[in-house]
Amino acid sequence: MKTNNEQNIPVHLLSGFLGSGKTTLLRRMLDYYTAQGKKPAVIMNELGDINLDGQLVGDEVPMAEMLSGCICCTMRGDLGMEISSLINEHQPDVIFIESTGAANPMETLDGVTEAAMYKSIDLRSVITVVDGPELLARSRDGKGRTFKLMQEQIRCATILLLNKADKLEPDQLVEAQQQLRELNGHAQIIATVRCAIDDWSWLDAEVESHLQEHQRTAMEAGHIANHTHIEGEECSIAGCTHDHDHAAHHHSHEHVMVVTHYWRSPVSSEAFESLLQRLPDNIYRAKGIVTFTDAPSRFLFQYAYKESDFLRIDPQGQVNDVAVFIGEHFSKAWLLRELELLEQAAHTAD
């Protein structure tokens, strides 16, 4: 169980096709954090036996290398172990995962959720770097596995960096932005040259916490009308049409991919199974470990497309009670509130 004052380590996943500029972006983000006196750590994945990009990261930054395999498939189980090892050895303030350009981010997310069972982490963003000229060239061809993968990487993003904007004519830049918006109607789009960004505030944990508080406040004020995001709304809080003029509004329409909830107390098995059945269709995957008030042991649960499965476990060592939910464009605020209500109901019943 977790207490209110325990902090989760932010995790940012970097995606994007080969040569788009991911490593350049990584170096800039590392500079941003080290300038604040914070300690970042990096996990880099390459298909080959040598991590050449890793040579560009300074020796002062703790780094784990995952070579000779794709992080999203053959090495997915290893990702959780690498995250745990980095945290145990270096206690970083933030972790960046740069996956190979051949990886599908949705599969990589599965490896991150495994790590959440063992370490207190919170996936904050999926940043996809898009090579602007390459996007236009491949979209005109309109087929092929490479273009399909590029589309998947764009769809999975919470932040889209349209890189190499200096190599696009003004009308081409507009065309590329329109293509990104058609594939992903929620992510923030930032046009960049060599991944240079002036405002990094969206990376900060404090901003994310502020957003969660804003969503909870709006919910308690009665602004949330239903469970899912309404297309076209200015605010991602469904039914809320207010214009919020603080930092949270800048982030309010981000595409939420993962919600990680660390249980603070056991919950009713019946109430939890009921919640899983009530999940909206755009939450299509969940997993974790939970302790029930009405059962003598802990359970590993898995949920996929309205089907759930529970396995009684007796884990060795320190294993967190956690629930991780994966989906597209769902209301994070609603889900967190429902999970809190489960815990409150169990506490009241005691």
Image (tube, grey):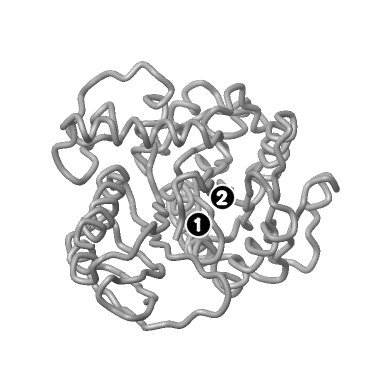
Image coords of residue 177 (percent x, y): 44, 31
Taking the image as shown, residue 64 lies to the left or right of residue 347, namely right
- Measured in 3D between alpha carbons, the distance from the residue under mark 1 to the one under mark 2, in whole angstroms, is 8 Å
Quadrant showing the C terminus: bottom left
- Quadrant in which residue 26 is drawn: top right
Secondary structure state at the residue bearing disc 1: helix
Q: What's the residue at 28%, 29% (across, down)?
A: 235
Say whether residue 7 is visible: yes
- Between 138 and 190, which is closer to the camera in this rendering? 190
Image coords of residue 318 (percent x, y): 56, 70
- Between 219 and 166, which is closer to the camera in this rendering? 219
**Mark 2 neighbour class, 10 Å CA radius: few under 14, some 14 to 19, many 20 or more:** many
The amino acid type, in three-letter code, at marker 2 is: Leu
Q: What's the residue at 19%, 61% (across, down)?
A: 349
Up the image or down, 37 lies above or below 348; here it is above
Q: Which residue is mark 2?
A: 13
Which circle, 1 or 2, is nearer the viewer?
2
- Quadrant in which residue 224 is drawn: top left
Q: Which mark is residue 219?
A: none
Query: Which badge, 1 or 2, comes first in the chain's sequence?
Result: 2
The residue at the far top in this view is 245
Up the image or down, 5 lies above or below 327; here it is above
Image coords of residue 109 (percent x, y): 49, 59
Say whether residue 12 is visible: no
**Mark 1 neighbour class, 10 Å CA radius: few under 14, some 14 to 19, many 20 or more:** many
Image coords of residue 253 (percent x, y): 35, 33
Q: Which residue is mark 1?
A: 105
